[in-house]
Amino acid sequence: MSLGDLWNSVFSFDNYGEILALVQNSVWAGAVLGLLGGLVGTFVVRRDLAFAVHGISELSFAGASFALLVGADVVTGSLVGSIAAALTIGFMGGRARSKNSIIGVLMPFGLGLGILFLSLYQGRSANKFGLLTGQIVAVDTVQLQVLAGAAVAVIAVLVLVWRPLGFASVDPEMARARGVPVRFLGILFMALLGVSVALSIQVVGALLVLALLITPAAAAQKVTAAPVPAVVLSVVFAVVATVGGIMLSLGGRIPISPYVTTLSFLIYAVCAAIAGARRRWGSYGRVLRPAARERTLTRS
Amino acid sequence: MTDDGGAAPLPAPRAGAEPAAPAVALRGASLSFGPRTLWDGLDLDIRPGEFFAVLGPNGSGKTSFLKVLLGLLPLTSGSAEIAGRPAGTAGREIGYIPQQKGFAADVPLRARDLVGLGVDGHRWGVRLSQRAVNKEIDSLIARVGASDYAKVPVGQLSGGELQRLRVAQAVAGNPAVLLCDEPLLALDLNHQHAVSSLIDRQRAETGAAVVFVTHEINPILDYVDRILYLAEGRFRMGTPAEVMRTEVLSELYGSRVEVSKINGRIVVVGLPDAMTHLHHGHAVPQLDQETEEAGA
């Protein structure tokens, strides 16, 4: 394959307007999932749950492939798998360390189950591949509506518990002392995360979920420490990655996920470079008053 | 005891007003882990505006004492109340100042956001009225003298700066009780004084009771009204002058312990071997400080 052919199979903008009209729904769904990923991601990063996201996605994959095998709805199967995994992690893993070992136990089990179901499956092989690498364009209008509805429901719950969940995520000891139901919120968040993972899998597939649920929030955190801008940037990054990825992929013959993950990664790389430059030259917002500082020191 | 000054006065009780309900009340409280009893038959009223210190060696149950008040640990028997409500249900009446513990460098939280968690972090939903909350955060930060680093990410703050902010965070909403869990640990002397005087000022201004768990009495000696000294499954309670005495501590530990006062500091010598980490004076501060930190 020559470089030109390669380019044409990756990027092709023939009849772009017509195709775009056809897949309008998936662009919208991509935007909603981007919004969801950006919001949920800020908590995933603050709660240090990157590994959990990966573990949940493998069990979600097992659920989806079982649904494919028995001819049930794939989105439902994926939801059941990921919520079961998320709640197991939420209930059993109180501390980060025990959490990680439970995830380490669940993950290969889920992946193994998924492979078993897929090898028993006799249908189209594109369906199998889609579970791992994303298939949003193949999802029909009814399913898209379900996806968007579920995403909106998760966002609504998230907004409802926004402040105490943030408190419990960054400063759990203090939150507990103030009467915030830290454990309840932790389990509730795992349930929300389970749903979010199952939905994101429909866009980028089980293997690449991290690009939607971690990378945008981690990138935002690189460039700002203020909570509100961090959330806004995280959402913007995630929406740019999903919608941009879907738009770029339309003409080519390649699944959406490489476009989404690459965009996501590039955004992160730029943010990391900005953070590096700032670390070298910035003052972290500290007001430096040499004279005043000396006075404090000599007084006390 | 308080002759060397420095302590802000107790808020005067209003004439004719009913005596205020105790900020903390324990009745027949005891705590055991299996066969090991940490303390037994503890009856205690801490008045609003009182500075109450809890001392004792590691493992004597002083951290557990705080956990009981926080409602994280049930009593084996007896009852514990905070501001008239059973421990564990009085969230808003409690300001908690934890041990100094740094944040990861990349936590997306600035100093002022940490204080903001104390102001409205417990409320449901999202913050709608930025302005009112910002005003309150600004005044809390000014109160602890942290305005110069209000916008610095918490991961970049020094231990002393962080503890000042912890005080600001804890006093948001004027809680009835300030529970302090070794807040001076791993701070240098200047910051120990600064942080403990901030805590005492809050006590004097709002009438909050302070429960101060520490293994080092000297930085707060000027402020303390009463001490609860826990050791060997027993306890003694009283003013520092009553408790920090050779006879009292010797009886408590069951071995000869010397207490002397040098330059206004209390030095305890001769603690049982297993408790050499406990230093009430600065006889060997450097070494002890290091072991303490390494163990933390």
Image (cartoon, coloured by chain):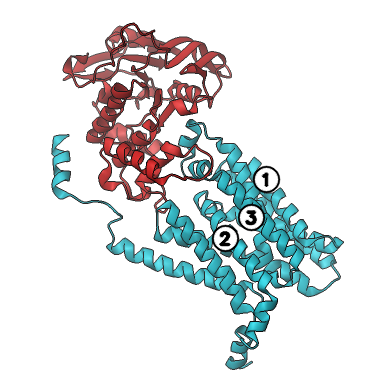
Chain colours: A cyan, B red
B65 with respect to A13 (left or right): left
Note whether residue B102 is visible.
no
Does residue A83 appear left or right of residue B158 in this picture? right
Judge if badges 1 and 2 mark residues of a common chain.
yes
The residue to which callout 2 is attached is A35
Rendered residue at 35%/45% (across/down): B111
Q: Which residue type carries mark 1?
A: Leu
Label 1 crowd (10 A; few <14 / some 14-19 / many >=20): many
Q: Is residue B183 visible?
A: yes
**x, y (%) of residue A68?**
81, 64
Image position of B151 with respect to A148: above or below: above
Out of A292 and B83, give the one closest to the viewer: B83
Residue at the spot of label 3: A152
User: In the displayed structure, would residue A233 be above or below residue B143?
Assistant: below
Subunit ID for the residue under disc 2 = A
Q: Secondary structure at mark 1?
A: helix
Which percent across, then down, holds residue A85? 69, 50
Q: Are marks 1 and 3 on the same chain?
A: yes
Judging from the image, mark 3 belongs to the subunit labelled A
Task: State which tag comes first along the sequence, 2 or 3.
Answer: 2
How far apart are labels 1 and 3 at the CA level? 21 Å
Read off the residue under disc 1: A87
Mark 1 vs mark 3: in front: 3
